[in-house]
Amino acid sequence: MFGPTADVGLGGLFLRTAVPLSEGQRVDVALSIGRDGRAVVAEGVVTRAIRAQHGLRHGVGVEFLRIVEGDDGLRRLLGKA
């Protein structure tokens, strides 16, 4: 799935996507952050799923279970380093 993030934190993210997902579904997340496109790769679980209305994209809240790669870059981006 692909979509723009509406909110990102150390614990997870919220994104808009054309693909409907269900709460409890496991997902792999890959984010490109910063101007140089550093990668953040995480394993997560859908904790909130909002169905699209009137042609809008679905909303999906994902909790990070484990950040596999890029934890340091995400912390710097968020000012938590």
Image: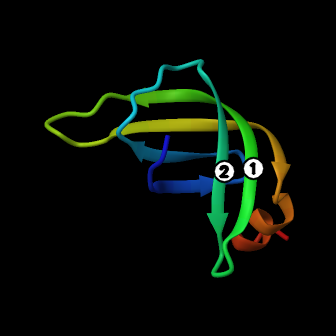
Spot occupied by residue 47 in the image (x, y as percentages of width and height): 57, 27
Does 53 sit above or below residue 72?
Answer: above
Q: Left or right of 26: which side holds 1?
A: left
**What residue is at 39 percent from the left and 38 percent from the top?**
59
Q: Which of marks 2 and 1 is nearer the N terminus?
A: 2
- Residue at x-position 81% and y-position 60%: 70
Amino acid marked by disc 2: Ala
Q: How crowded is mark 2: few (under 14 residues within 10 Å), some or many (20 or more)?
A: some
Relative vertical location of residue 12 with respect to residue 48 in this rendering, above or below? below
> Quarter-wise, where is residue 42 in the image?
top right
Q: In this view, does 73 lie above or below 63?
A: below
Determine crowd level at label 1: few under 14, some 14-19, many 20+ residues with C-alpha closer than 10 A.
some
Which label was assigned to residue 23? Answer: none
Q: Quadrant of residue 80?
A: bottom right
C-alpha distance separating marks 2 and 1: 5 Å
Element under disc 2: strand
Q: Outermost residue toward the front?
A: 1
Task: Name the residue nearer the viewer: 38 or 51.
Answer: 38
Q: Mark 1 points at which residue?
A: 41
Return the residue nearer the eye: 27 or 23.
27
At label 1, which amino acid type do we have?
A: Val
User: In the rendered structure, are the residues bearing label 2 and label 1 in contact, judged by CB atoms less than 8 Å apart?
Assistant: yes
What is the x, y in percent for residue 9?
Answer: 65, 54
Relative side of 18 to 34, left or right: left
Per the image, the residue denoted by label 2 is: 30
| Residue under the image location 49 percent in, 29 percent down | 48
